[in-house]
Image: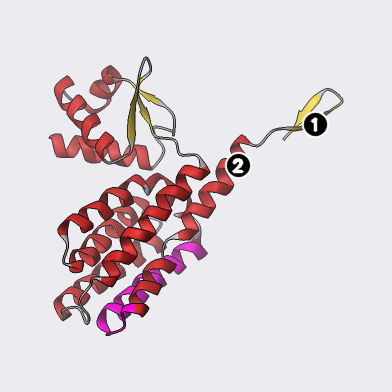
Amino acid sequence: MQDSLVEELENDIIFGHFAPGARIIEDRVMERYQAKRHAVRNAFSALERRGLLVRNPNRGVEVVEFTPDEVDSLYEVRIVLETAAAERTALPCPEAVTIRLERIARQHEIAAQEKDFHAVFWLNQEFHEVQYSCCGNPRLAELIGNHARAAQPIRVVKYDDVDHMKTVVAQHFDIIDAMKGTSVTALVDAVRAHLPASAEAYRTLYERRFRPARPAKNGVDLP
């Protein structure tokens, strides 16, 4: 029940039922998910650790809302961690690993084509967990997973962009191809290429949302 509640809350945060910056009320969550208070509090703590919720004095629990600069900082850390893992991955990877990654990547591709965004999210998560488990450093893989989860609300802004998702799908197969080979440089390049687009899209949406209104004309502010 606890794991299910955490997963449901995580999905609802990532896919916008609880908007960035929104306050989340315990009693309402208890009612919505038919959950006990202690389960809700435990779920809040788990999602705080994943970077999706924040507890603010006198305001309670809120959904994290990143500024573009915070997004840039998060992606800078992700690039450092993920390229470090790529550099530590023994190549070529075992065939069983690349076969599993290909299966996940194909399922992810189908989910993207069918616009099953929840499946896209979970399959992408599974793909990268398998990928980074090959780095030989479980703590590094755990850090990557934590930062990837924190970035999910940023990444989903591009899920309905068909061209973007085709690029993401192709990049997954580029990563697999590099893991089949012997070039560390090729794997690092494939990993690095996979990161920036969602962050750039988030910045565009954020600035569109918060940009100042154009000067008034005939007493009416222009968008």
Q: Residue at x 44, y 48 (%)?
A: 73
Determine the main secondary structure of the stretch shown in magenta: helix
Q: How many marks?
A: 2
Badge 1 amino acid: Pro
Is 26 left or right of 171, judged from the image as shown?
left
Please tell me in which quadrant of the rendered image residue 66 appears: top left
Location of the N terminus by quadrant is top left
Q: Position of residue 63 (x, y in %)?
A: 38, 32
Which comes sooner in the sequence, label 1 or label 2? 2
Q: Which residues are magenta?
A: 163-184
Which residue is at the far right?
218
Q: Judging from the image, what secondary structure is the residue with disc 2 in?
A: helix
Q: Which mark is residue 215?
A: 1
Q: Position of residue 218 (x, y in %)?
A: 87, 25
Q: Is residue 173 visible?
A: no
Let me know if residue 114 is in the magenta part.
no
Q: Position of residue 203 (x, y in %)?
A: 55, 47
Q: Residue at x 41, y 65 (%)?
A: 194
The foreground one among 155 and 146 is 146
Q: Gap in Å between the C-alphas at discs 1 and 2?
A: 17 Å
Location of the C terminus by quadrant is top right
With respect to residue 36, does 53 lie above or below? Answer: below
Check disc 2: other Cα within 10 Å, few if <14, some if 14-19, many if 20+.
few
Question: Where does label 2 land, which residue?
Answer: 207
Let me know if residue 165 is in the magenta part.
yes
Badge 2 amino acid: Glu
Q: Position of residue 104 (x, y in %)?
A: 25, 67
Q: Residue at x 15, y 39 (%)?
A: 3
The foreground one among 212 and 186 is 186
